[in-house]
Amino acid sequence: MTEAVIQDRLGLATPDQAERFARLRTMFEDAGCGGHVTEIKVKHAKLPNLVCVLPGASEQEVVIGAHFDSVPKVTGVVDNWSGASLLPSLYQSIAKQGRKHTFRFVGFVDEEKGLVGSRAYVKSLTDADRSRILGGSILTQSARAP
Ligand SMILES: [Zn+2]
């Protein structure tokens, strides 16, 4: 991905939580994940988790997640739009080549309220789901304000 695309997506940060969700969804669709984007309802959360799957030759999975919410009234660029807005670009980069593993990109809701979305996600996994997951990574803020 070009730096310009990554910068443009980073620039879409907004304090409006529903709009953050909508923008992440649009970015996934623009990245080519259209038919594989799903919303998973999360108990006690106004917005769902957002999942984009990039199928591979095998069902064995790598899960890459980032929370898309911010604390109220701030754009939360570093924490954590920097992580969330990178998910569609990772999808696009990895989609360009053949791959053995399936990649599952997850935008988590309400991390700032206590890991609400990610906890619900992990809790929802069946034993079969867990056995397919080889590993994963959480994209989170890589820099702190001075
Ligand atoms: Zn955070």
Image (spheres, rainbow, N blue to C red):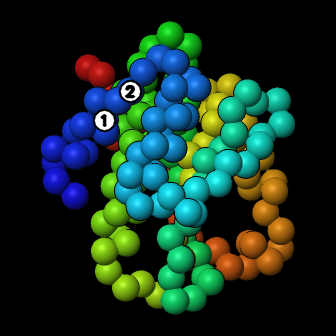
Q: Position of residue 126 (x, y in %)?
A: 83, 68
Q: For numbered disc 1, what is the local secondary structure?
A: helix
Q: Which residue is mark 2?
A: 13
Q: In this orientation, which residue lies closer to the viewer: 121 or 140?
A: 121
Whether residue 60 is visible: yes
Q: Is the shortest distance between ligand 1 and the CB of mark 1 under 8 Å?
A: no
Quarter of the figure with the C terminus: top left
Q: In this orientation, which residue lies closer to the viewer: 53 or 141?
A: 53
Whether residue 143 is visible: no
Left or right relative to 140: residue 2: left
Q: Position of residue 89 (x, y in %)?
A: 33, 55
Name the residue: 58% across, 56% down: 37
Q: Which residue is mark 1?
A: 10
Label 2 sits on what residue type?
A: Ala
Q: Position of residue 13 (x, y in %)?
A: 38, 27
Looking at the picture, does residue 146 appear above or below residue 128?
Answer: above
Asked where in the image residue 46 lies, by quadrant, the reply is top right
Q: In this orientation, which residue lies closer to the viewer: 144 or 9?
A: 9
Asked where in the image residue 59 lies, by quadrant, the reply is bottom right
Q: Is the shortest distance between ligand 1 and the CB of mark 2 under 8 Å?
A: no
Label 1 sits on what residue type?
A: Leu
Quarter of the figure with the N terminus: bottom left
Label 1, label 2: how many angstroms apart (C-alpha)? 6 Å
Name the residue: 25% across, 45% down: 6
Disc 2 packing (10 Å; few <14; some 14–19; many ≥20): many
Asked where in the image residue 49 lies, by quadrant, the reply is top right
